[in-house]
Image (tube, rainbow, N blue to C red):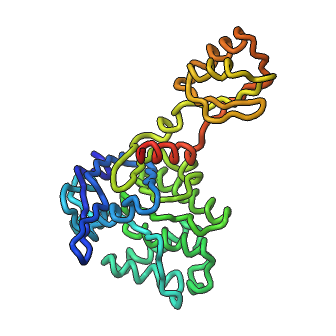
Amino acid sequence: MWAIETKELTKIFRTLIGKAITAVDRLNLQVPTGCVFGFLGPNGAGKTTTLNLLLGNLRPTKGTAFLFGQPAGKPEVRRLVGYLPEKFQFHDFLTAEEFLDFHARLLGLAKKFRKERIDEVLDFVGLQHRRKSKLREFSRGMLQRIGIAQALLSEPKLVILDEPTSALDPLGRREVRDLIVQLKSKGVTVFLNSHLLSEVEMTCDAVAIINKGKLVFQGRLSDLLQMPTQLDIRVQNPSPQWQNIASSFGEIVSVNSDAFSVQLKDEKDVPDLIAALVKSGARLLSVVPKRLSLEDLFVKVVRNEQH
């Protein structure tokens, strides 16, 4: 059973003049249980609309969305989900304890269980010592952690976090990242919408990339990062002959005065490329393999899809 599964999920909005705008276009998404899943895409790709469809805040124009095998939006399913939006605004005149108690009441938790659960989530996010402090006294990182605490009150099986580290300093990002890893260790599925691709690369097991409402990649992060390797090659007195040899193994992506970079089709071609260059008379000064970052690959995937 998937934690999240969508089938041909589509959302079309209409403007005041009747123009149709497709925000989500036949999205087929599958999120395994117990993983940290990154949901990526450029601005306007349809990520926020997708989140609202999964939460039941919007109804799809076509298609379906399921959480743990049940239709998204059903009250019994929503109890399985914890959510922290990107732009939250909490009641800053409340203390951390009062804030969590308020949300626990909204969830319908019994009084005895409320106190016990509030203690547990405050311990989990490291704010037990600030339980009597008003939220207006909290830093941005502390507010992010208390927001995660409220998302965990119902002991959800799925936690959806929308840009949880976007406005944090490095220490705050590290704290939130550690909490996400701890959630995974408890078997909780974390669905992470983020623009900070370095954070996604350090945290996520699998990712999906959407652009203009359409899915352009879905799979394990390790599979995405195994895309072709780039070699930065410095040679003495480079010639077009040597560049032509390199281009037969892949794509020349840059040429400088004494160096060129080639994007290989297959990492296994590295020894053959080096041997071919040496045989042709090239005097190699250095050969540096460069594994592309998630940011590099994200840009490449999105641009390829656009073209």
* 6 on left or right of 285: left
- The residue lying at 23 percent from left, 69 percent from top is 75
Residue 85 image position (x, y, % from top left): 43, 70
Does 22 sit above or below residue 35? below
* 265 on left or right of 279: left
Residue 302 image position (x, y, % from top left): 46, 47
Q: Quadrant of the C terminus?
A: top left
Query: Of residues 109 and 204, which is closer to you in this image?
Result: 204
- The residue lying at 53 percent from left, 37 percent from top is 225
Residue 244 image position (x, y, % from top left): 62, 20
Question: How many marks overall?
Answer: 0
Query: Of residues 48 and 35, which is closer to you in this image?
Result: 48
Question: For residue 162, what is the image quadrant?
Answer: bottom left
- The residue lying at 22 percent from left, 63 percent from top is 60
* 98 on left or right of 239: left
Q: Quadrant of the N terminus?
A: top left
Query: Of residues 236 and 288, which is closer to you in this image?
Result: 236
